[in-house]
Image (tube, helix red, strand yellow):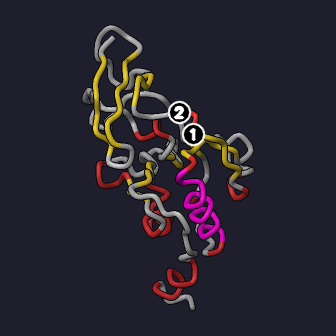
Amino acid sequence: MPTATFHHPLFGDVTFKTKHDFWLRGDAITFVSGFDTRDITEVAIPQLKTIPGTHGGKLGFHKSCHAQVLAAFADLEKTDLLRFVKTCAGSVNFRLRKPTSGNLSKLPSNHAFGIAIDLNSDDGSLGASVTPVAPVFEAHGFLWGKAFNDPMHFEVEEFVDAPKSVARPLLKALGFV
């Protein structure tokens, strides 16, 4: 099994191994050191309770980003942007990255760290239908996957300990208030 060390911008050096004896695109991984998977815990997101793929709104996320995930979805609801979220392809997945180019990546996916979520993956455009929600996620410290041709994907770029609602400023900027 290939074993590698990767410097994650939020977690530092982490070592992982793959499931197979060779590098395989999207292969399952196991962390060997530097990352504690017990820090990924379930968070109940009320706004996702009826969204397919969310297990009744309960998804796994790293404990350091629970507050900002909850704040982002609360703001989507407040701004009436939640209506653009139709499905969820999940959050936690212990695997290597799967670039949309189809190329092999030897780096762990941010889903493996519990800091990413995929929305509307089944819309026929890699999730581009969630474009309207991107400003809310970005305001809460997320990077939008459109930057690397994966518009369904949102990942925590920085931890926000005490997130503040961006609903009113966003609505004002859009001319609704």
Picture residue at 57% right of the left edge, 57% below the top: 69
Q: Residue at x 29, y 49 (%)?
A: 148
User: What residue sits right under mark 2 in the picture?
Assistant: 37
* Position of residue 44 measured from the top left corner of the image (x, y, whole percent): 71, 50
- The residue identified by callout 1 is 40
**Image quadrant containing the C terminus:** bottom right
Residue 139 at x, y percent in the picture: 45, 69
Main SS class of the magenta portion in the image = helix
Q: Is residue 4 above or below residue 140?
A: above
Q: Which residues are magenta?
A: 64-77
Q: Is residue 40 left or right of residue 159?
A: right
* Mark 1 nearby-residue class (10 Å; few <14, some 14–19, many ≥20): many
Residue 157 drawn in magenta = no
Name which residue type carries label 2. Answer: Thr
Check if mark 1's residue and mark 2's residue have beta carbons within 8 Å: yes
Q: Residue 25, percent across and down?
A: 33, 23
